[in-house]
Image (tube, rainbow, N blue to C red):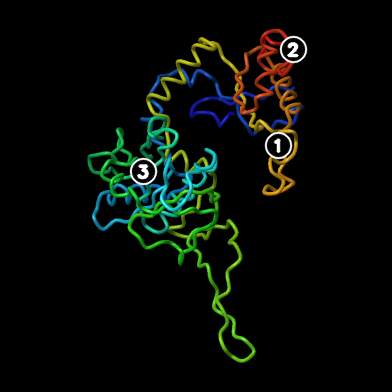
Amino acid sequence: HRRGRPAGMQAQPLPPAWLAAGFTDKVQRVDESVHRRGTGRRSQTPVNASCAPWLLEYAAFHAEHRHRPDSSYLVYTCRPVMPQTNSHCLGFGDRFRLIAYLLRTAAHHRRVLLVDWASPHDLSLFFSPPPLLGASSAPAGRGAGRRGGTAIDWRITRAEAAALDGLKVHRWGGPMSADAMPSARWVRVVGNTPWMSAVGLNATLPAEKGGDGTAGPPRRRPPPRPVFPPGQGSSAAPTLGCLLRALFAPSAWLAAAVEARRRELFGDSPFEGVHLRLGDGAAGTAFRPGTVPTTDRRMTVDGAVSVMRCLASAGSSPVFVATDNARLKAAILAGKRGGGGGGGSGEEV
């Protein structure tokens, strides 16, 4: 859960119990006071986009071309009804990874990226586009940051929603090659392409000639490896977080809601936080062995309980647990009520 320390803050060493349990000291502790500075300021703070310098140029391109009549658009789409495909948008992780890939793809193909995420709720309720540090000032309007940076404003306007209504939604599950990019002005996409997949490669090789000298059918290229070409204009990025931070900052409403909930749970006291994603069917094996590699193992509930006990033994601070596993939730709640179970002593969880 720790994502590195804010500027000016000193890293704190991990407790010996954590190191003995295999945690790495590369993951830094963050003083919880940084999250108590205000409710909406995070969404107004410019993001340093030095992790991928092309983001700054693309932010300026995006702001300049957003509403031009000759612009082309690449639109992540998740709606209850999506023409020519089903309504399954996949999990949140798949959605954000695809959006990050579409950001790279839009920059490569000089398209304006939009995010039309309306199911189950409008994404703009929870996130807003932050201004990018170092980007040139945008014209007055939705793309202009409050402190001089230019935001990649992905939010859909009513006019854009009307233009998109009824258009086909493409479902991508892998890299989109240069010769397969639709030529339409509005290209709507849903799916689960990994964020680091290759961008802009040709999908076909020249046809092989047969023994009689005639050309055979075109050969398909093997799936391109996630290796980015060096050089100017490359849409490479070192991490998924680099791309997502350039697009999303907590909205004022989300920041206020999280702050209110934190105060309700912990007041002004520090706390530890951990996210344990197991899935309700986690038993140490893949969810669906027929469709998921058998080496894809999930943490077991017993393993999660071990993590909780490690956390509880590392200090006296309460522990906030985010998990999707019903059995682990029940074990933690039972422990909190004094019934033993998931997290060691109930007072510490």
Task: Looking at the image, tell me whether mark 1 or mark 3 is earlier in sequence order.
Answer: 3
**125 over 89 or under it: above or below:** above
Pick whichever of labels 1 and 2 is earlier in the sequence: 1
Question: Residue 141: x, y in percent?
Answer: 24, 39
Q: Position of residue 171 (x, y in %)?
A: 49, 53
Q: Earlier in the sequence, mark 3 or mark 2?
A: 3
Q: CA distance from mark 1 to mark 2?
A: 24 Å
Residue type at the position of mark 3: Ile
The reply to whether the C-beta atoms of the residues labelled 1 and 3 are less than 8 Å apart is no
Question: Disc 2 residue type?
Answer: Gly
The residue that label 1 is drawn on is 298
In terms of image quadrants, where is residue 282?
Answer: top right
Marks 3, 2: nearer the viewer: 2
Per the rendering, the mark at residue 152 is: 3
- Label pair 1/2, CB-CB below 8 angstroms: no
Q: Nearer the viewer, residue 28 or 340?
A: 340
Element type at mark 3: loop
Residue at image coords 39%, 54%: 168
Q: Residue at x 52, y 67 (%)?
A: 203
- The answer to whether 132 appears left or right of 293 in the picture is left
Q: Residues within 10 Å of mark 1 (few under 14, many from 20)?
A: some
The number of numbered badges drawn on the structure is 3
Rounded to the nearest angstrom, the CA distance separating label 3 from label 2 is 49 Å
Circle 2 residues within 10 Å: few <14, some 14–19, many ≥20 = some
Residue 126: x, y in percent? 42, 30
Report the side of 92 relative to 283 (left or right). Answer: left
- Give coordinates of residue 3: x percent, y percent: 56, 32
Judging depth in this view, the residue of 3 and 168 nearest the camera is: 168
Residue 340: image tag: 2
* Marks 1/3: CA–CA distance: 36 Å
| Quarter occupied by the C terminus | top right
